[in-house]
Amino acid sequence: MTLRQMVKTSTTMESIEKEFAQFVREQKSTIYTVCYMFSNDEEEVNDLFQEALVNLWKGYGAFRHESKIGTWVYRVTLNSCISSERKKKRRVQAIPLTMDVNLYEDNDADTKQIRQLHERIQKLGMVDRAIVLMWLENMSYDEIAAVIGITPKNVGVKLFRIKQQLMKG
């Protein structure tokens, strides 16, 4: 490889990295929200976020713009979280030692309701959690269907059943 080719490749790589960094700044809220729905533990959420970023980077050059960038981000991030969840189930569970004391915990009624809803959502299956998350993000049934790979009508049916399940507790 000549010096000119090396400089050109380096410049191209730099511009791709800058473009990806901007992309991450624009999409980080979506990525983090999806990761948050798959864990209660801040450290694990950060690990999921990191894994999703790696997978987004790997697929960034291959994204063909056949769907909205947001749909692609949801799909890659969901697949990353689901894969991680499957790996986690195969590992032996370690029991963390905690003090069970949090002096900074907020205990107002709204926080308790949000915590209860989050706990109920955590009990749902992975696909159902993903559907709820996207619905809470005000995605249309068509967009949710594109990410999950089902029909919009099936999204509606699943959401109805999920809501019934969440009300039961």
Image (cartoon, helix red, strand yellow):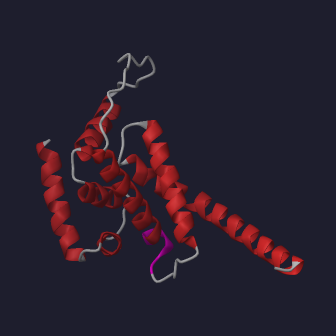
Image quarter where the C terminus lies is top left
Tell me what residue is drawn at x 56 percent, y 71 percent: 60
Please say if 65 is above or below 34.
below
Judge left or right: residue 53 versus residue 14: left
- Dominant secondary structure of the residues highlighted in magenta in the image: helix
How many discs appear?
A: 0
Give residue 81's position: percent from left, percent from top. Answer: 38, 54
| Stretch in magenta | 67-71
128 or 98: nearer the viewer: 98
47 or 164: nearer the viewer: 47
Judge left or right: residue 7 versus residue 56: right
Please say if 41 is above or below 90.
above
Residue situated furthest right in the rendering: 3
Tell me what residue is drawn at x 33 percent, y 70 percent: 140
142 or 74: nearer the viewer: 74
57 or 117: nearer the viewer: 57
Please say if 141 is above or below 39.
below
Judge left or right: residue 69 versus residue 138: right
Tell me what residue is drawn at x 54 percent, y 77 percent: 62
Q: Does the magenta stretch include residue 13?
A: no
Image quarter where the N terminus lies is bottom right
Q: In which quarter of the image is residue 106?
A: top left
Give residue 36's position: percent from left, percent from top. Answer: 40, 46
Give residue 82's position: percent from left, percent from top. Answer: 34, 56
